[in-house]
Image (cartoon, grey):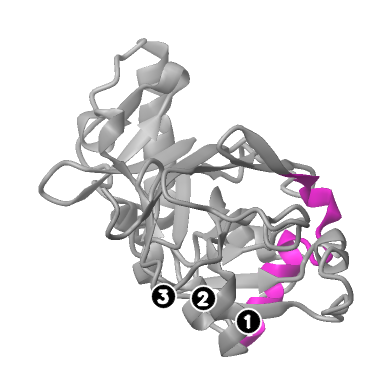
Amino acid sequence: MRLVSYDDGAGDRLGIEAAAGRIWSSRALGRGLPASMTGLLEGGEMALAALRSAARSATDAGRPGDVDPSTRIAPVPRPSKIIAVGLNYRDHVEEQGGRVKVPQSPVLFAKFPSAVIGHGATVEWDPQLTEAVDLEAELAIVIGRLARRVSRDDAFDHVLGYTCDNDVTARDLQYGDRQFVRGKSLDTFCPMGPAVVTRDELPDPGSLAVRSWRNDELMQESNTSHLIFDVPYLVSFCSQAFTLLPGDVICTGTPSGVGYFREPKVLMGDGDVMSVEVEGVGRLTNPCRELGRG
């Protein structure tokens, strides 16, 4: 299934995205189904199975969509935590010209949940705060079941599915602060979406094309087969240190091609559009705006 969240004016609601961009409200598919992503995560496997059955019936009946796609928000609107992985593609390490080395274990940092926005929402920044905004295309893991000290072999049992993440970064703050929190967590700097694709539809997250664009210019093109630390390893590794709660997100890292390490640098500006695409998940697109302009 392709799970989405949308705002109906009274709060965030759960939807299922079907063929041709149709979106069904979970509440319209039957009584007792979870009304929000939070409700689905709290309901666990039984709620997911009921929703899957209802979606199958709606597909068979050719049910039209009942949700305006423009009301879509981030599929997981309020994760308790977002764990990001740095330097997880060898070519991204190499493009930094010897500044860093290939890690022997995952390099973790956090992005604040207040940075989360959805597909189509605007990435905004104050040009007096940063003048070096960059994009990073990433596959993101969404946790579906509490995970604490789980093994690599059991890791997939705790995964709800996958989404696209754009790890938007203020490079001048990232390197000026000498740590990542501020440069990675400015408001709007964590676009996610357009949907969470459940893991049964993506049984092999280790072989997915990953791309990004600045406007029409292809910036990044790689594959999750090049991850240094793969999906089950990351889930297991993170769970040794932190209890992963349903809805938590692990961003698996970005490949080479980001704008900051090009010569000359290619950075985001007012009016630009950033897009991230993960094979089987979809394309996440967000316009850019410098605050104080327009």
Which residue is painted at 36% across and 21% down in the image?
Answer: 22
How far separated are the C-alphas under marks 1 and 3? 14 Å
Residue bearing the label numbered 3? 129
Compared to residue 95, the image places residue 74 above or below, namely: above
Regarding mark 1 in the picture, which secondary structure is present there?
Answer: helix
* CB-based contact (under 8 Å), mark 2 and mark 1: yes
Residue 69, image x and y in percent? 31, 30
Residue 253 lies, in percent from the top left, at: 69, 63
Front residue of this view, candidates 181 and 152: 181
> Hey, what amino acid is under mark 3?
Leu
Q: Which comes before the other along the chain, label 2 or label 3?
A: 3
Q: Quadrant of residue 112?
A: bottom left
Mark 1 residue crowding within 10 angstroms, few (<14) / some (14–19) / many (20+) = few
Q: Which stretch did the figure color magenta?
A: 220-241
Q: Amino acid at mark 1?
A: Tyr
Please, what is the three-letter code of the amino acid marked with disc 2? Gly
Question: Magenta stretch: dominant SS?
Answer: helix
Question: At numbered mark 2, what does the secondary structure look like: helix, strand or loop?
Answer: helix
Whether residue 225 is in magenta: the answer is yes
Residue 271 magenta-drawn? no
Q: Residue at x 66, y 58 (%)?
A: 156
Q: Point out the frontmost of discs 1 and 3.
A: 3
Q: Position of residue 199 (x, y in %)?
A: 60, 46
Residue 123 location, quadrant: bottom left
Residue located 42% across and 56% down the image: 44
CA distance for labels 2 and 1:
8 Å
Q: Which mark is residue 175?
A: 1
Q: Which residue is mark 2?
A: 183
